[in-house]
Amino acid sequence: MLRHLMALFVLVLLALPGVASAQDVRPPDNAVNVDAPRASTGGAQTLQDVLRRQQGLAVDDSFRRNNIGGDAGTAPGLGPLGGTSDAEQWRALRYNEADVRVTTLNTTGKVLVQDGGMWWLDIRRGALPAYGGWLLLGTLAILAVFFLLRGRVRVEDGMSGRTVTRFKAIERFAHWMLAGSFILLAVTGLLSLFGRKVLIPAFGHGFNSALLTGTKYIHDNVSWAFMIALVMVFVMWVWHNLPDRTDLTWVRYGGGIIGKKHPPAKKFNAGQKLIFWSVILLGASVSVSGLSMLFPFDMPLFGHTFAVLNDTGLPQALGFGTLPVNLAPQEEMQYAQLWHAIIGFVMMAIIFGHIYIGTLGMEGAYDAMGSGEVDVNWAEQHHSIWLEKVRETEHRSPAE
Amino acid sequence: MKVMFAGFAGIMVIGVVAYFGLHEMGFSSQDVYSSGNVRLD
């Protein structure tokens, strides 16, 4: 599904020049049967295919994909290849439908021609860094505009100087392990993605090679700390992040971010719950695709996922047709890389917002994770229900 | 502040343990796909 979505983006980009063509693409006057059905060409390409390819439109390659010999392959008395032609054999190899047996340990030894390679390379080099980069820059721009318009959310009655404990040490430890590892992973991930496009032209091959070797060590090993911290954060805070009725009130008031209202909230408000679930779900997804790449060819995820999706009928309903389930090992890794990078970009954009609101955007917010102690006026303004509960607990068991 | 640095220290410790632990387990492609007749180093 992802492949078709990405292909759609690339096609839109490529089809635009086709709209503004300088010359007419018309077949010559003595051309015979321009719209001839494929059968009359003996199953080969038609002029229509060539014209569509020139205009950057998708060509329906089912005439190749389905023409791989069929029953002729097992025709009796004709040796191991049966009655198939060489062309049919090569098409079977190209579309990963051939029955290949190899003596290499690595299953990639079976793949002579990988049909999925070029579209992946085009996206990896073109659409992925372009759209991802613009997503990040756009997010920063939106935050800058928001800050200029709204300014910092102040504590209205000013800081009182009296504090209440918001986060215990273990909570802050888990958060900072998650945050620190995420920053390292994000930076090293971006360096890996933009190495060829940006770093090599700027600093040369030697610098890029040395930098990315170190980057890879950091990315691969820090990822474990990220996964451990993700589990810790989930276990500690999942109960406080389950949606409830106060969230509806909070959303109705726009979180108080526009205007002067102070909607009540428990330990985490609806906005924080969105951040929590985004980090947990997207973090789990990025971790699984990352593990797939840490143990290459050992954890193929997409063939099976596509088979399940095909069974639900959703891709067909959305117009993507049947998703490919017979993926070469390299193709699995390619899908994993694209998915990992896209989820990474989305997470980075979300975390930009999280960092903004926790530092610049809201007075008194950083203390929650910095020292664990927040001003009571801040707590009254932003998490009134939580503050009430904390005070009740203190009254019931007063400190000695 | 102390807890933040403790978190960062945790990242470094886990990173180093992961590096050596994984290599001990023979996780690298070099180790996985080598055999008696195939040297990949």
Image (cartoon, grey):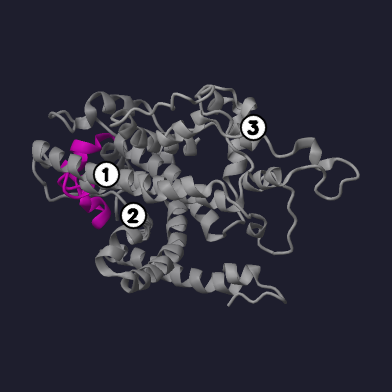
Using the image, name the chain to which the residue with label 1 belongs. Answer: A
Q: Amino acid at mark 3?
A: Gly
Q: Foreground: B38 or B25?
A: B38
- Left or right of residue A395: residue A157: left
Per the image, the residue denoted by label 2 is: A168
> Tags 3 and 2 in contact by the CB under 8 Å rule?
no
Image position of A389 with respect to A26: above or below: below
Pointer 1 local density, CA inside 10 Å: few below 14, some 14–19, many at least 20: few
Per the image, the residue denoted by label 1 is: A134
Pointer 3 local density, CA inside 10 Å: few below 14, some 14–19, many at least 20: few
> Tags 3 and 1 in contact by the CB under 8 Å rule?
no
Distance between the alpha carbons at the discs numbered 3 and 2: 71 Å
Pointer 2 local density, CA inside 10 Å: few below 14, some 14–19, many at least 20: some
Look at the image and give the residue range highlighted in magenta.
Answer: A357-385
Using the image, name the chain to which the residue with label 2 belongs. Answer: A
Where is residue A313? Give x, y as percent.
59, 25
In this view, the mark in front (3 or 1):
3
Distance between the alpha carbons at the discs numbered 3 and 1: 43 Å
Where is residue B9? Give x, y as percent.
36, 69
Q: Which mark is residue A43?
A: 3
Task: Count the labels in the image.
Answer: 3
Q: Foreground: A397 or A55?
A: A55
**Mark 3 or 1, nearer chain start:** 3
